[in-house]
Image: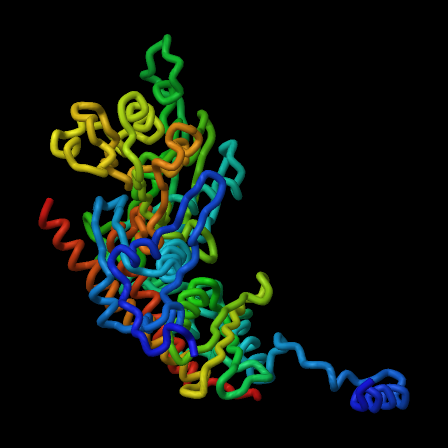
Amino acid sequence: MAPSAGKKRAPPTAEEIDERNMVGVNKETVTNTTSNDYPDNYANEEHAWDKDDFRRSFKVQWHDNQQFEAQFSLIGIDASIANAFRRILIAEIPTLAIETVFVNNNTSVIQDEVLAHRLGLIPFTGSKKVICDVMGFWQKPAEGEDTWSTTFDTNTVGLSLKAKCTHNKDAPQDSKDPKVLYHNAHIYAKDITFDPLGGQSEWFTEDDKIRPVNPDILIAKLRPGQELDIEMHMHKGYGWDHSKYSPVATASYRLMPTIKITQPILGEDAKKFVQCFMPGVAGVEKVTRQEARTPDSGYEGHEGELKVVVKDAMRDTVSREVLRHPEFEGKVKLGRRRDHFIFSIESSGQWDSDELFLEAVKTMKRKCSVLKPQVTNMVYTF
Amino acid sequence: MPGKTKSRCADAEEVADTTMEDAPTSAQQPSDGMQEDQSGNNEEEDEKDEEEVEPQRVRILPGSSNTAASFEFLKEGHTMGNALRYIIMKNPDVEFCAYTIPHPSEDKMNIRIQTYDTTTASAALAKGLQDLEDLCDVVTDEFWTKRHDFMASK
């Protein structure tokens, strides 16, 4: 019989749990990197999935919420789940993008295929509701079918770009700027016009019109006599097919850094310590009278001297610079919290950044609910 | 040498080009049912199928028993693989769970589940999917309430 049998092991203290979730970042190595919240991993601890337990322990903290950038922390979640959300954000949320380019005329120096590629990458926006709920996926017509048999106002958005570069007769004699010398020398995303098909003129009105997110994206440069006459079809697609369909510019997470000062760092060392980090991460404070009087605090007799305090560990880049200096050896412990994910989502404009994460969670739930009946209907082959 | 091996050798001598019946079948060999699914996909467009009748994308691989089975998922990857693996490992009735993508150019993901006698592998998989759904609900609730609090506090 195991020596501990019969004797109940005490439940872990908050400190112990903290220690378990800490990834050690050392000079040359990392320690304690894998998840351990599984059943049978610790004696007398359950660690089974429980919805209510998860609801109690899971926390979200917001840091920033703008249309094009959202930053928030997911606390108390496993890396596999956080990573699933990140992957869905990048590749599995559909958006509209230019898919087909019909080049009626292109006498510019940019080749048709390069131009088509550039056009595809321009992020567009419009009525979110219509794009999500009304617009569906376009399908290639079957062989022998008419080219447009699958193209409808509910799956295709038409755009066109017509521009001809000409001399500007009113340009000043001494001018050298092509934008002054010629009309339409630079073609921008704002020059693309939306051609509503069918019901689209009612769905995409005024502010909800299909338009480039950034009107100032340069598409091509022309010189007098050169001309662009292009029609485009936008379709819905997924990021796993082509990155132009990805709704995010970036979607990433990092683990919350921790800096633990285990022994006092004082005086000149304190100033050097602060220099090892990004601004705002660490700072210096004067040792208070109370600290100087507390026995075993390490600050005895140092009243008024400068000491190091950690101000905002979240801003740390974990460069480990501090570990290169022998004077700090054994005085500081760097780490990261394994269950604290600082997400950063930058939307490319068709969705709002915060909405995107919600959509990612919804997508994962949908994937599960699609697979559930499939598991029940599974073909048994053994 | 064990007798079994000897008799097999004798068989091999009789038929010069031995039939490889004794060799384990490739786990990756698709069954007839799966092949039908795939050819169906090629003719029609994938997205259309997703909206209409979803083709069967999960099957049990050969060599499985009630408490130890490998499942093959079509059109799934690391996203669902690792998330499912985690949530299934959280199940105390599960002895072992792991996922793999056998080949990067095949859109397939395999999950191996071995359970104790208290449940079956396919029940553990079904519970995993249900738990993952519950997790999504909790994340959605917490995320959106905290977002409202944050926007209100600004």
Q: Nearer the viewer, residue B31 or A177?
A: B31
Quadrant of the rendered image containing residue A131: bottom left
Residue A155 located left or right of residue B73: left
Q: Is residue A255 rendered to the left or right of residue B67?
A: left
Which colouring convention does the figure follow? rainbow
- The quadrant where residue A230 appears: top left
- Taking the spot 44% from the left edge, 31% from the top edge, the residue there is A324
Q: Between A168 and A258, which is closer to the camera in this rendering?
A: A258
- What residue is rendered at 26% in x and 59% in y? A358
**Quarter of the image containing the N terminus of chain B?**
bottom right
Q: Residue at x 49, y 33 (%)?
A: A108
Question: In the rendering, at what x and y percent does residue A71 appear?
Answer: 26, 46
Please give the count of numbered marks on the rendered protein: 0
* Residue B3, position as x, y percentages in the image: 81, 90
| Residue A145 appears in the figure | no
Q: Is residue A356 above or below residue B28?
A: above
Q: Is residue B40 left or right of residue A362?
A: right
Q: Which residue is at 44% across, 29% downward? A: A222
Residue B105 lies, in percent from the top left, at: 59, 62
Camera-nearest residue between A162 and A318 = A318
Vertical placement of residue A327 versus A5, above or below: above
- Answer yes or no: is residue B95 visible: yes
The x, y position of residue A134, in whole percent, is 28, 64
Quadrant where the C terminus of chain B is found in the figure:
top left
